[in-house]
Image: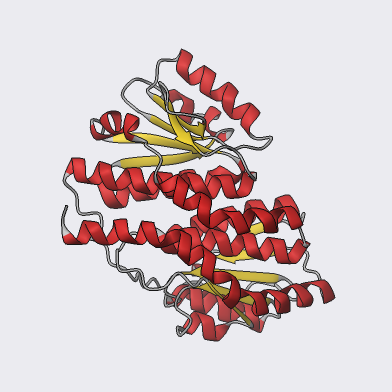
Amino acid sequence: MSEVEVRMADEVREVPEAVRRQQNDLARPLAELAARLARRPPQVVVTCARGSSAHAATFGKHLIERYIGLPVAAGAPNIASVYHQSLHLRDQLFLAISQSGRSDDLVELTTSAKASGALTVAMVNATDGPLASACDILLPIGAGPELSVAATKTFVATLSALLRLIASWTGDGSLDGAIERLPDRLAAASALDWSAALGALADTASLIAIGRGPTLAIAREAALKLKETCNLHAEAFSGAEFRHGPMALVSSRYPILMFMPTDAAAQGMHQLAADLRHKGTALFIAEPGAAAAGRLPALAGDHAETDAVCLVQSFYAMVIRLAKRLGTDVDNPRHLQKITRTL
């Protein structure tokens, strides 16, 4: 195993402690944010993010719509940076998510949102960047240094920070308890054996990832990581969206990774899984239970939202092994760099 490969594996192992220690840094700004939201409740939330952070924003959309009942829209940064237009966001919540906080277009849209009267919040790992300075409230992700180009530790820590945001906003005690148990569960999830999928994934050039509800963001992140670290084309869909056209892709040539939620969304996903098996695809379902034919083991259900986070931790452990099998450099993907500056 090369030095750079060890680096990504080390960062995956650091995830549980990163999630555990972020509570202290987030307590005060989350309390301030919750108080401001209570005084002036928004009617809509707009997110702003790129790459893995955009997948975290998808997770945030699910959480906010599920627990708060507010619609969440993804803002297009080029509205400000390319088209020089502003959005009408007075008294609304604008949530910018970034690892580095240095992408020019994110900063520009955030600055525009603040000028329009939005309450702007930066959820960033690098707290000394321009995005953090541009916002009313700073929520530090607190993952610590991440040297591998592909985000792992910062992605999971961002999901955890979003969970803490929702728990603070709603006062949901059950979610608080699940977050407290999350670090130990993440450590256990890292040790689960997903090697049953390695052969099929190593022998394909293209595959599909499917999730729904809390696992849609996980499927999207998995598809990106397969591109970044393994040079595999992977496309992500929601379980419902997959039936609208993409179902035509199903064949034995395209393996499917399904990230099974542990909430009400599971019923439709199980029906989809049955249909896919009937059509003869190579299907691998990450779900609670021991490893079995077509099943990638997941921890027993604890809380649907944190269960989803544990799935991506197990996936990261597997994708490192897949990259080694394919001979790709997981820490230095071709044509990519750690900080991406977009205009």
> Quarter-wise, where is residue 260 in the image?
top right
Q: Left or right: where does residue 4 sit relative to residue 73? A: left
Vertical comparison of 242 with 181: above or below: above
Q: Nearer the viewer, residue 150 or 254?
A: 150
Q: Is residue 333 left or right of residue 153?
A: left
Where residue 164 appears, as percent x and y from the top left, is 64, 64
Q: Quadrant of residue 293?
A: top left
Residue 281 coordinates in the image, percent (x, y): 39, 20
Q: In the picture shown, does residue 153 fall above or below 113? A: above
Look at the image and name its color scheme: secondary structure
Residue in view at x 41 percent, y 24 percent:
294
The quarter holding residue 205 reads top left
- Residue 333 visible somewhere in the drawing: no
Q: Total of numbered circles in the picture?
A: 0
Front one among 148 and 23 = 23
Could you say which is closer to the camera, residue 77 or residue 42?
Answer: 42
Residue drawn at (78%, 64%), measured in percent from left and top?
Answer: 43
Residue 19 vertical position relative to residue 206 in the rendered view, above or below:
below
Q: Is residue 214 above or below residue 265?
A: below
Which residue does the image show at 68% across and 56% down from the upper left? Answer: 177
Residue sitting at the far top: 278
* Left/right of residue 79 with respect to residue 65 in the rendered view: left
Is residue 9 among the parts visible in the rendering? yes
Task: Measuring from the top left, give residue 227's x and y in whole percent.
Answer: 31, 48
On the rendered image, what quadrant is the C terminus found in?
A: bottom left
x, y percent for residue 216: 54, 44
Q: Residue furthest right?
A: 39
